[in-house]
Image (tube, grey):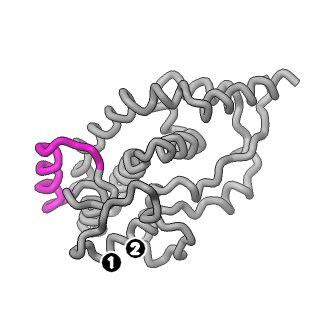
Amino acid sequence: MRAAAISMPRLDKLPGMFFSANPKDLKEPNHSLLDDKTQKKKPKTFGMDVKAYLRSMIPHLESGMKSSKSKDILSAEEVMQWSQSLEKLLANQAGQSIFGNFLKSEFSEENIEFWLACEDYKKTESGLLSSKAEDIYKAFVRSDAVKQINIDFRTRESTAKKIKSPTPTSFDEAQKVIYTLMEKDSYPRFLKSNIYLNLLNDLQASSLK
């Protein structure tokens, strides 16, 4: 089948892409992750460092996407593979973006943001583990986190202890809980959603032309 060119969703609409670079080196995005309908009331003790860290999640990949036509092409076969498993969906950058938009429509985008944060954290240099672990904990895990994820008390407490002496696997337990939540809850709905089905139908129709 012939791969069909489509207009890729703006990656800057999907928060949660983390970088190993110092957040200070990244340009200030126009959109803040704190401006969504699910924003919890920010406690007075919430530090400005976490607010800046959340802003740094916005990806700055748009120019890179435009420079390579191959990345702007998505085939029906590729999109069909997303229905095989959540793992295959999240392994695809376009899949991450489209699934992220779906989660945002359900007001649960913090799940993929946290999952992506954990993936980035595992690649972090040892000297930066402590500061990044603290930022992720404050942003997603702490009981008063702005983007608090839905994990049980035991996992929350266990994660809090692990980041005191952070290792690349400090968030693995919490990440697994959130992955399972997406896999059993959001992912099946995504496969039945108009976001996914319309994309697949359009690509299949284009491939027949």
In reply to whether residue 162 is colored magenta, the answer given is yes
Mark 1 and mark 2 residues within 8 Å of each other at the beta carbon: yes
Q: Which residues are magenta?
A: 149-166
Quadrant (top left/top right/bottom left/bottom right) for the N terminus: top right
Could you classify mark 1 by the number of other residues whose Cα lies within 10 Å: few (under 14), some (14-19), or many (20 or more)? Answer: few
On the image, which quarter does residue 117 sit in?
bottom left
Q: Is residue 172 above or below residue 199?
A: below
Q: Nearer the viewer, residue 114 or 149?
A: 149
Which three-letter amino acid code belongs to the residue tagged 1? Answer: Met
Which three-letter amino acid code belongs to the residue tagged 2? Answer: Ala
Going by the picture, which residue comes out furthest to the right?
209
Q: Is residue 56 above or below residue 72?
A: below
Can residue 204 be seen here? The reply is yes
Quadrant (top left/top right/bottom left/bottom right) for the C terminus: top right
On the image, which quarter does residue 57 sit in?
bottom left
Q: Which residue is identified by label 1?
A: 48
x and y percentages locating residue 73 in the rendered image = 73, 40
